Amino acid sequence: MTKHKLINGFRGVVAIGLVGLLVACGGGGGGSDDSSVSSEAITARGMITQLGSIWVLGVEYETPNGGSFSDDDNVSSVANYKVGQWVRLRGRRNDDGISGTATEVEYEAEIEGVAAGGAINGVTIIFTASTNTAEAGNIIVLNNGSRYEVSGLWLDDSTIEATYIKDDDDGDGIDEIKGFVEAVIPGLSLTVRGITYSYGGPTVVAIGDFVEIHFNGTTASRVELEDDFNDQNEGQEVEFEGAVNLDPADLANCPTSADFLIDATCIDWDLVPSSGWMDGLSGPGDMEQGLRVEAEGHFNASGLLIAKKIKGRGNRVRITSTASNVNGGAGTFDLFFGDIQVTTMSGITEFDLDSGTSVSDISNGDGLEVRGIRTGTASMLAQRIKSESVNANRHELRAEVDLNGADASTNSITVMGISSVADSDTELEIEDTVIAAGSGSTSEADIDSFLNMIDDDNVVNSTNGPRDVVDVRIDTTNSGNGSFGSPYLADQIEIELEDD
């Protein structure tokens, strides 16, 4: 029995406590070819997390002979797909929610081109702790002059959070990029992501079309419409993961009731009930440009995705701590006494400061709540920064647990390189349900059982998903010197249940 399956079992047994949780969990599942299995038609978009079959959004899809599988418009096979690539698929999802059959899978890179200064064609490529670069020699920075193919999430028109990078070795030397058409002069030019390309080809495109451009310099050689997967029947069930796009110019291409986009898909959140905002999201106020989410729902007659659930997804960080080493000119500062480095980017960072609207207005010692993307063991890209009162002994860190970061042998939990130790005063929770109350009452057995439940490995499949997200409230006065990796005292540890 996997630890993650145990955590998922908690959803149905909250009321009977920890002992019931440990007993109630069951085994995993997989794709099924049993014709008696009940299923529904599904259109999905998400990142590949495991192969053999193909795992997308926590579902293991079998890929039978006769299916349609493509790689950048070329006929392909499942054997050619890679973990970290974003794909769109059609098929059927079984009622168990973790298995199904994919009859059509399509992979296309977000951008291809030559690297220069950490960017490709002027688009900054952000590496994260989990970016798959194996096919590019396990690089940690883009090599100037080398050609790459990148799959990932557009955070804005000039930034991609990369999940997969490979050497662009197809030999055609043609650059590619996706985006909305912002302006067009038929037979002469079109503008995508702020860049105008000369184009005299036969494809007729209009403002608001989502396209893929093949180009050299600023001359486009081919333009393709990219909306074929969005032409769905009314009522079609949809499960899409991606980065939130709130750009008014892009929303102008949607039906008027749309609230945000994922790629070219317009989505309405108005009918999401309070219980449908999940995994770190409490409502529309939490939605921000570039936030990685999963939206579940159905298409209406206008092709608008009417969401019924919206969930926060991995690589997200929320830290409450005090600032240090502030460098307003560089847009950087540190948290946790210099142990966590924060970089901000204009255009996607939102400021809600008591005084000021930029990093230059932050002073060392200011209390902050910072939300963004984890980019390394102890670094992040900030997307939202606001002033926050920070008690000297109650700093907070919410992120995916580090690899092998839950250690029952030492009663420790490590998140973003910050280690803290649980003791009898530590309150233990699973999604707001108290497992052990702390205040001197938490036992060694409570701590051991709790830490052993946390999924902290790199196994990702239909029953054991990405490492668990935990929220740790930390007594920083108990660490001695506040140095990197010090064993702070954990006042509270909470496992946040995130669907895989």
Image (tube, helix red, strand yellow):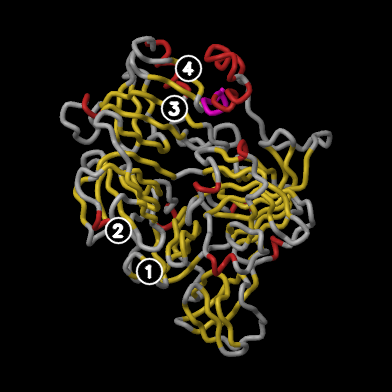
Query: What residue does disc 3 label?
Result: 494
Assign the N terminus to one quadrant of the image.
Answer: top right
The residue depicted at 77 percent of the width and 38 percent of the height is 33
Q: Give the amino acid type for the residue marked by disc 3 in the picture.
A: Glu
Query: What residue does disc 4 label?
Result: 435
205 horizontally vs 159: left or right:
right
Circle 2 — which element? Answer: loop
Depth check: give the residue in front, 255 or 422. 255
* Residue 61 painted magenta: no
Q: Nearer the viewer, mark 2 or mark 3?
A: 2
Say if 454 sits above or below 400 in the image.
above
Query: What residue does disc 2 label?
Result: 358
Q: Earlier in the sequence, mark 1 or mark 3?
A: 1
Q: CA distance from mark 4 to mark 1?
A: 50 Å
Q: Mark 1 packing: few (<14 Cα in 10 Å), some, or many (20+)?
A: many
Circle 1 — which element? Answer: strand
Q: Give the amino acid type for the residue marked by disc 2 in the picture.
A: Ser
Q: Which residues make up the magenta segment?
A: 1-6
Most frequent secondary structure within the magenta stretch: helix
Q: Nearer the viewer, mark 1 or mark 3?
A: 3
Q: CA distance from mark 1 to mark 3?
A: 41 Å
Q: CA distance from mark 4 to mark 2?
A: 41 Å
Say if 286 sits above or below 214 in the image.
above
169 horizontally vs 492: left or right:
right
Q: Earlier in the sequence, mark 2 or mark 1?
A: 1
Q: CA distance from mark 2 to mark 1?
A: 29 Å
Q: Earlier in the sequence, mark 2 or mark 3?
A: 2
Find residue 107 and report its image quarter: bottom right
Assign the C terminus to one quadrant of the image.
Answer: top right
